[in-house]
Image: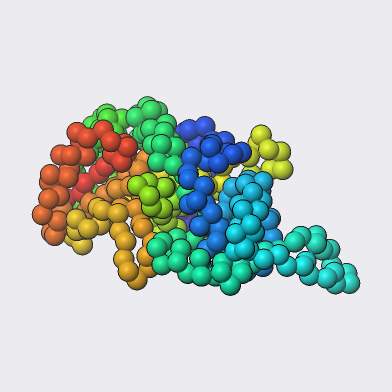
Amino acid sequence: METSTAESTSRSKLTPQAQAPTVPTSFEELGVPKTVIENLLIKTLAAYPKSDILQLTKLLCINSHMIEELIAGLRKKSLVEVFQAASETFGQDHTGHVRYGLSETGGKEADAAFAKDAYLGPAPVSLSDYDAMVKAQDVRARVVTKADVTEALSEVYGAERMIAVLGPAINSGRALLLYGDAGTGKTFVATRILNSLNTSVYIPYAVYAAGNIIKVFSPQHHKRAESAATNQSIIFKDQYDRRWVLSERPNIQVGGELTMDMLEVNHTEHNRVWMAPLQMMANNGIFIIDDLGSSRCPLILCLIVGLCQWSTFLITFLYLTASR
C-alpha cells in the first residue's frame, strides 16, 4: 500500500513535455473540414436534445462562437429548432439560455450521420496537428538520466546491473527486447521503465484522417494527469485546446492474443466507430508485447524490425518487447 501511494504521488507531479495546444478561434485553425464538425454537432443534438450553446461548447470542446456559426447555418437549412428557455423556478438561479433541438428533417440527417460514423464526443484534431504533437512529445526529446532510471527501478531486485544498459536503450527510443526464463520479472521491469519518463503528454480524443474520425483517447488505456475540473481558467490565454487530454504516458500491454487486426484501424458494423490501433494509442509511451513466443501474429517479427526503422508519425514512441 505504501509503494502504491508513493508511486501515485510521484506520478501526480508529472510536468507536460510539450507546450499546451492553443485554443483555435476559427475553423481554419481547427484544421478539420467544417462539414465534419457540422455533422458532429447534428449527432450531438440528437443525443442531447434541447441543449444550449454552453452545453454544446463543453461537449464538442470548441469555441462558442464557432458553435453559434454552425447553429445559424443549420437553422437556415431548417435542421434545427429553437426552444424557449425553461421558466425560472423560485429560489433557483436561471441563466435563461436559448436551447436548440433537431427538427424532423434534422433528425433524419442525424440518422444518416450516425449510420456513416457513430462517433460522438469532442471535435477531432487534424492529422498534421497530431503529427506535430507526437514529435514534440517524443521520448528522445528529453534525455533520461541515470537518476531517473535508478528511481524507476528502485523496487527491482538487482536493478543496479541493468541501469547501465537500460538507460541508453530508453534514450534511443527504439525497440527493446527483454529475454529470460519465465518468472524472472521481465514484464515487471518493462512496466517500471515508464516511471523514468517523468513527463505527461497531450492525447487527442480523436483524430481526423482520410475522411474519417478515428477515436484515440481511451479511458481503458490512458490515465488523465489532471481531473476534468483542473485548470478551468476563465482567462483565455491560460486555457488550452480541450480537444486534447493531458495524460500520463501510455502503457499498453498485450500478450499472445495479439493479431494483425489489432494493429489496424478498427471499424465494426456493431459500433460503427473507427478505433485507433494499439500502437497509435501507445504513441509517446510504451507498447509491451508480452510472451512473444505464443503470439498468434505471424508477422510480429517483421513488425519489430519495422518499428525500429520506420520514421512515420505512428512510430515515434518507445516500444518494449517482453519474451519468455
Give coordinates of residue 81: x percent, y percent.
67, 66
Give coordinates of residue 62: x percent, y percent.
59, 47
Give coordinates of residue 77: x percent, y percent.
60, 59
Q: Is residue 223 above or below residue 164?
A: below
Query: Residue 316: in sight, yes or no?
Result: yes
Depth check: give the residue in front, 282 or 267: 267
Depth check: give the residue in front, 14 or 220: 220
The colour scheme used to paint the residues is rainbow
Which residue is the extreme one toward the front? Answer: 77
Depth check: give the residue in front, 254 or 242: 242
Write the residue at 88% across / 69% down: 91
Left or right relative to 151: residue 16: right
Q: Is residue 77 above or below residue 153?
A: below
Left or right relative to 39: residue 50: right
Q: How many marks?
A: 0
Left or right relative to 80: residue 279: left
Q: Is residue 85 above or below residue 300?
A: below
Write the residue at 80% across / 60% down: 95
Which residue is the extreme one toward the right? Answer: 90
Q: Is residue 75 above or below residue 170?
A: below
Write the residue at 12% across / 46% down: 301
Write the residue at 41% across / 33% down: 132
Query: Residue 14: in sight, yes or no?
Result: no
Give coordinates of residue 319: x percent, y percent.
26, 42
